[in-house]
Amino acid sequence: MPNRYKQQIDEVLEAADHMTTEELDRLPYGMIQLDASGRILNYNALESSLASLSKGDAIGKQFFTEIAPCTRVQEFYGRFK
C-alpha cells in the first residue's frame, strides 16, 4: 500500500475516535469501532445496511465471536490483537 494511502487511513481512523454517531453515519463507507477486547463500540449506518444488522443488534457484542466469527483468522484477528 502506498504511503499516502496508509497516511490517509491513519488520519481517518484517528478522526473516527472523536466523531459523533451522526458524523460516523455520514461516512461513505462502513465503519465499526471496537474496544481493545473486540467489543463493538459503534457501528455506522452504512455498515448496518451492508451487513443487514441493526446497530442495536451489533453494539456491545463481541465482533470476532458473536458478529463475524469468520474474521477470527490470523490474517485479520491476529493483526487486531
Image (cartoon, helix red, strand yellow):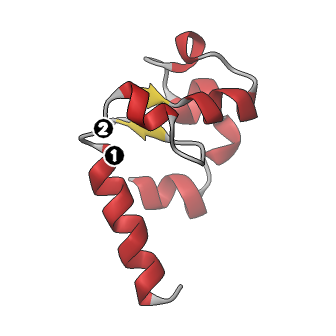
Work out whether 43 lies above or below 54.
Answer: below
User: Which residue of the protein is positioned furthest toward the left in this rendering?
Assistant: 18
Residue 3 lies left or right of residue 76; in this view the side is left
List the residue tagged with mark 2. 19
Q: Amino acid at mark 2?
A: Met
Work out whether 56 lies above or below 68.
Answer: above
Dot 2 alpha-carbon crowd within 10 angstroms: few under 14, some 14 to 19, many 20 or more: few
User: Which residue of the protein is positioned furthest toward the top in this rendering?
Assistant: 56
Name the quadrant containing residue 14. Answer: bottom left
Q: Residue at x 75, y 24 (%)?
A: 52
Find residue 39 and report its horizontal and vertical position in percent. 41, 28
Q: Residue at x 29, y 51 (%)?
A: 15
Find residue 44 and report its horizontal and vertical position in percent. 52, 31
Assign a secondary structure to mark 1.
helix
Whether residue 38 is visible here, answered yes or no, is no
Residue 33 lies left or right of residue 19; in this view the side is right
Q: Amino acid at mark 1?
A: Ala
Q: Residue at x 43, y 54 (%)?
A: 80
Residue 57 lies left or right of residue 26; in this view the side is right
Residue 3 lies left or right of residue 43; in this view the side is left
Q: In the drawing, what numbered circle is on residue 16?
A: 1
Q: Are marks 1 and 2 in contact (CB under 8 Å)?
A: yes
Name the quadrant containing residue 30. Answer: top right
Assign a secondary structure to mark 2.
loop
Find residue 77 and report its horizontal and vertical position in percent. 52, 52
